[in-house]
Image: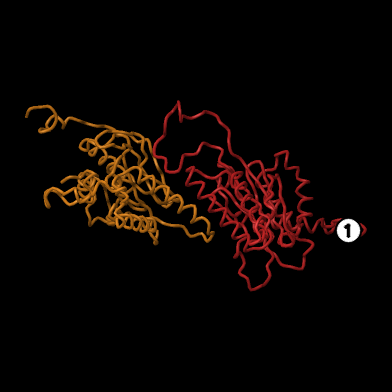
Amino acid sequence: MKAVENGGTAIGIRCKDGVVLAVEKITTSKLLKPGANKRTATVDRNIGIVSAGLVPDGRHFISRARDEASSWRNIYKGPIPTSALANRLGGYVQAYTLYSSVRPFGVTAIIGGWDPESELLVDGQVGTGPKSGSGGKVEGVKAGGPALYMIEPSGLYWGYHGAATGKGRQAAKAELEKLDLSAGNLSLYDGVKEAARIIFIAHEDSKDKDFELEMTWVSSLDGPTKGRHEEVPTGLLEDAKKAAMRSREREVEDDEDRPKSHDGERMEE
Amino acid sequence: MNHLPQAWGRPRDDVYGTYDRSYLQTSTPNSHTQSPAVTGTSVLAIKFNGGVAMAADKLASYGSLARFTDVKRIRVFDKTTVVGFGGDISDMQYIDRLLDSIDVEENYSSNGNTLNAKNVHTYLAKVLYKRRSKFDPLWNQILVAGFDDDSKPFLSSADLLGTTFSAPHLATGFGAHLAIPILRRLFPEEMPVENIGKEEAVAALRECMKVLFYRDARSLDQYSLAVVTSDGVELKEDEKLEAQSWNFAENIRGYGTQVN
């Protein structure tokens, strides 16, 4: 638990037309190559995972997630729904709390995905199949959409509209709550801007350390990523960063005008 | 010469005498993998200036029965690679799923490198060869089209034995007998690929598909047509043969019910 509390902040935002994942990657040395050692990973094509806490545990967690996704494909000949992946990973993480021979996972992971809303072909399907009757198609069925889950070291997981973990999670959660995500009005592009802004706010307490903002997204099938989990394009990422820094500066100026408040206002739990 | 998939990989009867099937030990557990069940026939492909075009009809035969008529035998891999399958359809499905899992795993590293058609062809040839070495072959003839490492048009074949072969135009199954001579006449070997236009190449394929439908009893008048260029793959899966003329059939003797 301590490990998770001190990892770089990671957040996920479930927007109406996609999901954004962002992580504050603390750079421990100037000798590290920028952009290397990614903290976000793709599972199957449509799911992304970001974790806060022990990096090697996160890597193993992702490796397990990929195995689960591929074994699902082997059985069902289609992509794993994000909810099913969260369920299996929740079970996996929980199992590490049960035995004296292993220690629990040192990560809290955020899983974001877009489950395809259109009817998918079965993997390897060669024909069109029957038009009606048994095995036929039902017209106008609505399925899929954005999904966001967070799994804790205990194995506990919930679905979220906005999730935050890591060191700056308190500040991040406060900002996420202001977005009124449950109304389902936030667009993916706005989500990208907000995610960058929130990571910058959450970083404030550990200002002395350098960090990289890593951001990935997955959109609807007719959105910018066509249902795939990808890195946010560099141009968009830089714009979001600049906007975030500008809004930070503005707030700092406002703060300086006001009388100084107590530090205790933003106490950790 | 017997061009049927059942004869692929077997010694020719006219050269070596009738094959002694007792050697096949048909009682072994894997014996059903020693012959194809539901098969597709020809795949045709031709390189042109800036890309490759490929065509394959939509029939899957169960022996001589036209069992399925909506089978898509041209498969897209990543953005600029297509794979055309002749031979066993269930083995095609297996390979298609294999390629799909490769594609998923390739995307896990975000270094921007992707597999091109040449890589896919090398991989498939090795899979096919490994399986034939286990005496459990994947009963397919495969054409891979797309681009090589230098972004030049790439076209190559691989078969159930793991044999590979490249040429500016290729065909599998009956097409190897009927379409290749036509393509060679239209586009002689010494003619550089740069001189062949996209429309020309596609028109040639359509013409060959027609000849194949006239002559190959395991073919269909509906086909898939894929055109790969650096912009991506344009795959049309509802093509139909146009302007057929069966006048020549009157003059064919030696088949059917007529006496002479």
Q: Is residue A188 above or below residue A142?
A: below
Q: Nearer the viewer, residue A240 or B164?
A: B164
Residue A13 location (% of width, % of height): 68, 48
Q: For the view shown, which residue lies furthest in the right direction?
A: A259
Residue A135 visible in rendering:
yes
Residue B153 visible in rendering:
no
Seen at 64% across and 47% down, the residue is: A19
Q: Nearer the viewer, residue A94 or A58?
A: A94
Instruction: Tell which chain the image draws in red.
Output: A
State the residue position of label 1: A264
The kind of secondary structure element at disc 1 is: helix
Seen at 23% across and 44% down, the residue is: B6
Residue A228 location (% of width, % of height): 55, 48
* B160 displayed left or right of A265: left
* Chain B: colour as depicted: orange
**Quadrant placement of the C terminus of chain B:** top left
Chain of the residue under the numbered disc 1 shown in the image: A
Q: Amino acid at mark 1?
A: Gly
Residue B45 location (% of width, % of height): 30, 48
Q: For the view shown, which residue lies furthest in the top direction?
A: A133
Q: Is residue B45 above or below residue A166?
A: above
* A104 displayed left or right of B90: right
